[in-house]
Image (cartoon, coloured by chain):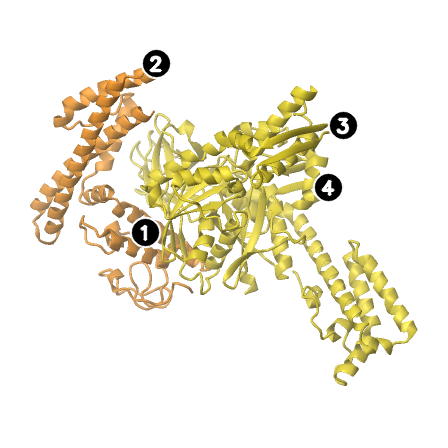
Amino acid sequence: MAGNEPKSSSSLIMPGETTSACWSCGEMRAAHFCSACGKVQPPVPVDYFTFFDFPRKLNIDAGRLEREFYELSRKLHPDIYARGEGREQQWSLEQSSLLNDAYRTLKDPIKRTEYLLKLEGVELEEQSKAATEKARATGQVKKQVVPPDLLEEVFELNMQLEELKAQKKMGEDDPALIEEVGRQKLELEEKHDALLQELKGYWNEWDKLVDSGTDEDRHKVRDKMVDLVNRRNYIRNLVRDVNEVLEG
Amino acid sequence: MSADRIVGIDLGTTNSLVAYMQGERPVVIPGEDGANLVPSVIALDENDQIIVGNAARKYLIETPERSIYSVKRLMGRGVEDIQDELKLFPFRLAEDLRPGEVLRIKLGQQTFTPPEISAFILRQLKRNAERFFNGPVSKAVITVPAYFNDAQRQATKDAGRIAGLDVLRLVNEPTAASLAYGLDKRQNGIVAVYDLGGGTFDISILKLQDGIFEVIATNGDTHLGGDDIDNLLIRIALDDIRGDMGSDLSRNGEAVATIRKAVIEAKIALSSQPATRLNIELPGGRHYQREISREQFEQLIQPIIDRTVGPCKQALKDAGLKPEQINEVVLVGGSTRIPKVRSLVEGLFQRRPHTDLNPDEVVALGAAVQANILGGGSEITQNMLLLDVTPLSLGIEVAGGVTDKIILRNSTIPASATQYYTTQVDGQANVAIHVLQGERELAKDCRSLARFDLKGVPPMAAGMPRIEVKFLIDANGILHVSAREQRSGKEAEIEVQPSYGLTDEQVESMILDSFDYAEEDFRQRQLVEARNEAGTIMAALDKAKQSPAWGQLTSDEKKQIAKLVKALDQVKKEEDYGAIRKAIDALNQGTMRLAELMMDSAVSTALKGKTMDEADMGEAPEAGHPVAKADFK
């Protein structure tokens, strides 16, 4: 079948998996498809880095990731098993959805960082979910933890946004206020970019520590990244709010 | 091979087509009338027989209450979704329809659901393909608007099943078009497909790289297209007529259908000429006349075509691209023939759109390419792979009526998400889940896909169970749900009730009903084939009359043959398959000696006992030969 020619790709054989046999041909199998006959294999629950056989490092070569994604798609996509037996179709569906989910997460620098932090035991998402649920249960607006150094600024910006919203409702227009809010938005965007740069600095540190650091070192960097990601997300939401008011 | 014959179908709002891959190229399969496009029109004739396509069009005017067009607008929708449609289209709903029920449309005294009506169109396309291949066709790839939601996709799949087709894949229309384009061009780059059809608008942005067709973003409006332009022009004409002649014809089905036909012709004319004249004969013999310039037309339609701008900008934004980063813009759909639409696209993307492909056919051709890929591919398609996305975010209703998005729009499919649920009361056995599709914050503003209960949760204290629910969107863009209680390891039973879909039982019963039509299909096919064979043998006989063997027959023999030919010619025009068969056999018998004489003179011995059509060694018309002997079971 097209795209199924036996082609061994050693980078895809997972350590510890190489001894199990392919269900179809009995030969050596790789993580997701058999390296000998090319057939899709039953999915094994693995994290997204392992799925691509990448180390748990934060600097990823985007070009290589895309190439791997395309190559794996050619092996795993349901189109290739359209004429296959039922279980092959099911495995291909599960494997390719895992592939797509993994690619979507690793491709995006922030999602990738958040995902790694989650693997390292930080429950960013759970935290915010719990906060959301609590806010809803009590009927209050969800309180985000405002980074202390932003407190004053954010307070003022929120006041201005409220005023702008009220003016828009009345059909009024205050160019001076719009300009002021626009200026603050620019500042926030600069801050956002600076945070991203800082975060990338910690990526390099983290990647070094993966190979040769102590747990303690790694935890320090991890906690620093949690802080940066939270601040960055906070500012991103703020910029989104400003855009909504300005465009709305 | 023939068992694996897979066709590509474009089930359009206005026209439908079937195509397949002929060697290296996708080609459209014409109908019996030679036309590539089958109008998506269904009518009941005088004998309550279903008529599809061109032949059904005259009924739109003659008996509008027994005909229907643009049924695609109703696929996968509930009665509360289509209030706007009902004002503009002559859809007649069944009177006993309840809210939340699948729509049923009246056609004469009968009622049909939209998937059943679409199945009539699919069955006609299937019939056209079977006639073309001279053998059964049971597998298909069907295209849908990229912006179709889960219910609309499911309805399309149901229509395929009802028509007796195994739908191997639903492909998004703009993506299909990109396959046809890519097959042609074989170039890497970013392509935008702008698809404005009869009833739907889609914009898709793709990255083409070494045979991978990766959709980066898609957007659209499933209720925007040429129909809207027609309806606007109809309304203007009706207003004019009321003003000029004082008569309100808006409730006169025949008059509206006549006006509709005329404004569509005017719309088409204005794409190639600067002005046109509407001249409509109204019931009662009066005439409505009006001159329309292209300029006026363009002003009128501006608000409609402007509605495509928002989705295009959103798609670019979602793709993270600027217009100048698009390498090519491909136009799809009949409405992109309108010069004003072309200039709008040119302005949006700052480049001249690619118009080499036939906008009516390119989607069907792409579907044929995808059908070929699914069938195992050929040399030319073996490197091609489509990676499509889900057009709408998938969410779950959480406390406070808020949508919690779990799979974001423009995620490559298949895609999945896992959610964990628990109970709020001790010993609670069921957990209700409401699945939504859409981008809005509040559940009530999103499309309700399904409500279901996780049943059989083992009795535990409140908050103890940990129910893992997995949502998976497959390569057709259709959602699947599975659930498991993790603490007990027990698989929870799930009952999914699609909000506006047919249940499996309903589809099964419609398939059973459709056997009546399948029998009709079989009868039709036999008839067509017998007629073809009759034509072949008569043509062969005409040719034989030029040969010396003809002169060797006695005048009685010649008279007898003439009689048999006349008899065959007569029954050939009628609907009785058995009679045609009999007349063919009689003519074959009656020309046995002629055949022998011809062979004798040609090759001499050894070939005796052959019949007329076998003895004709010239090139017989392709259609005939042993077709009638083929066994259709």
Residue at mark 3: chain: B
Residue A51 rendering spot, x and y as whole percentages:
27, 54
- Residue B45's disc is 4
Please state the horizontal and vertical placement of residue A190, each as a whole percent of the image: 18, 33
Q: Secondary structure at mark 2?
A: helix
Give the mark nearest the N terminus, 4 or 3.
4
For the N terminus of chain B, which image quadrant? bottom right
- Give how far across and how far down residue B496 sits, in percent: 46, 39
| Residue that mark 1 sits on | A99
Task: Indicate whether A172 appears above or below B42.
Answer: above
Q: Nearer the viewer, residue B235 or B613?
A: B235
Residue drawn at the location 76% of the way across and 76% of the way down = B610
CA gap, disc 3 and disc 2: 55 Å
Q: Which residue is mark 3?
A: B284
The chain whose colour is yellow is B
Q: Which chain is orange?
A: A
Q: Residues within 10 Å of mark 2 (few under 14, many from 20)?
A: few
Q: Chain of mark 4?
A: B
Mark 3 lies on a secondary structure that is: loop
Is residue B119 or residue B56 the one in the foreground?
B56
Q: Amino acid at mark 2?
A: Met
Q: Which residue is mark 2?
A: A170
Query: Which residue: 65% across, 49% down?
Result: B515
Residue B68 placement, left or right of A31: right
Picture coordinates of residue A112 (x, y %)? Answer: 23, 45
Which amino acid type is marked by label 1?
Answer: Leu
> In the figure, residue A8 lies in which quadrant?
bottom left
